[in-house]
Amino acid sequence: MEVLDLFPRSILRGTLPAPLLNQLIDLGESVLANPSASPDASAKLAGQLRQQRELRPDQPAVQQLSAEVLLPACDRWIRHVMDRQPPQGRGPWVPGRYRLQMIDLWINCQTAGDYNPTHTHGGSFSGVIFLKVPPQINGNSFDGQLCFHGPEDWHLQSFRTGMAHYVLPVPGEYYVFPAWQPHSVMPFRGDGERWSLAFNAVAAPAAAPQPSSPPGNVSLSSQRPVARGF
């Protein structure tokens, strides 16, 4: 006999290089020490946190994070999922036929009692990068943990046990997932601050290249306009 776990949700996990993690912590310290210099992201976010500040795309650590880690992670997710599909069912999601673009990146500063209710993001992909975690956030409780939610309520008595997955935040680790994936962050007790970065990215089909001159020996039907889009 074997057990089949059906309908998995693909979540990508990785670890930042130590030098990049240190650069991002330095950036976080600079931003949070002078919050008025960075736009407040709280108004458009679900989190009930002490501070949520937008980061700029021209900041060197942000550029490196986006180009070397997060966008390649989104691409890795696409490859993992699409390579399991029949070639005819992959649409534009084959190498060279789509582009990825970062659209939002912000820092979250969470203190005791702060939380993030269950929510989703805009765009195509989202994710979180953990920067600093107080020592009392550990595997002994749900405090401060990130939770991924399934499509049904968790209910142990009827064996719906796979509908909530908790992640212990570890500095330097990051998670990337589709923007529609519901998730939340539990509050924690005690001193200290829990820092994380979050982002949104979009994946879009690339414009089809236009031939410089009409090819020869083709039927007229192949030259008819084709509907574009997803």
Image (cartoon, rainbow, N blue to C red):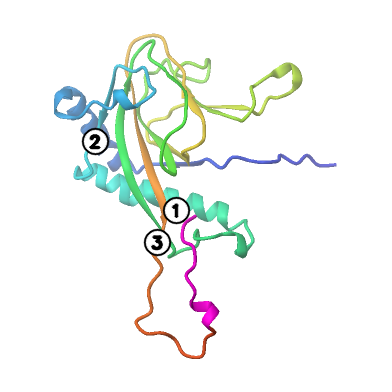
Residue on which the image places disc 1: 75
Work out whether mark 1 precedes mark 2 in sequence or the reverse, and give the earlier one: 2
Give how far across and how far down residue 55 sits, in percent.
24, 35
Q: Residues within 10 Å of mark 2 (few under 14, many from 20)?
A: many
**Dominant secondary structure, magenta:** loop
Q: Secondary structure at mark 1?
A: helix
- Residue 167 or 71: which is nearer the viewer? 71
Identify the secondary structure beneath mark 3.
Answer: loop
Residue sitting nearer the eye, 159 or 142:
159
Q: Residue at x 44, y 27 (%)?
A: 169
Marks 3 and 2: which is nearer the front? 3
Mark 1 or mark 3, earlier in chain: 1
Three-letter amino acid code at the position of disc 2: Leu
> Is the N terminus in the top left, top right, bottom left or bottom right quadrant?
top right
Residue 160: % across, % down: 70, 24
* Residue visible at 50% across and 58% down in the picture: 93
Q: Residues within 10 Å of mark 3 (few under 14, many from 20)?
A: some
Q: Would you place residue 52 above or below residue 22 in this image?
A: above
Q: Residue under circle 2?
A: 55
Q: Secondary structure at mark 2?
A: loop
Residue 206 is marked as 3
Q: Which of the 4 image quarters holds residue 190?
A: top left
The residue most toward the right is 1
Residue range corresponding to the magenta coloring:
220-230
**Could you give the CA–CA distance between mark 3 and mark 2, rounded to whole angstroms?**
27 Å
Looking at the rendered structure, the kind of residue marked 1 is Asp
Residue 116 in percent (x, y) is at: 42, 20
Question: Residues under labels 1 and 3: Cα distance?
Answer: 14 Å
In front: label 1 or label 3: 3
Structural crowding at the residue carrying mark 1, measured as other residues with C-alpha within 10 Å and reported as few (<14), some (14–19) or many (≥20): some
- The alpha-carbon separation of the residues under discs 1 and 2 comes to 22 Å
Q: Residue at x 33, y 27 (%)?
A: 44
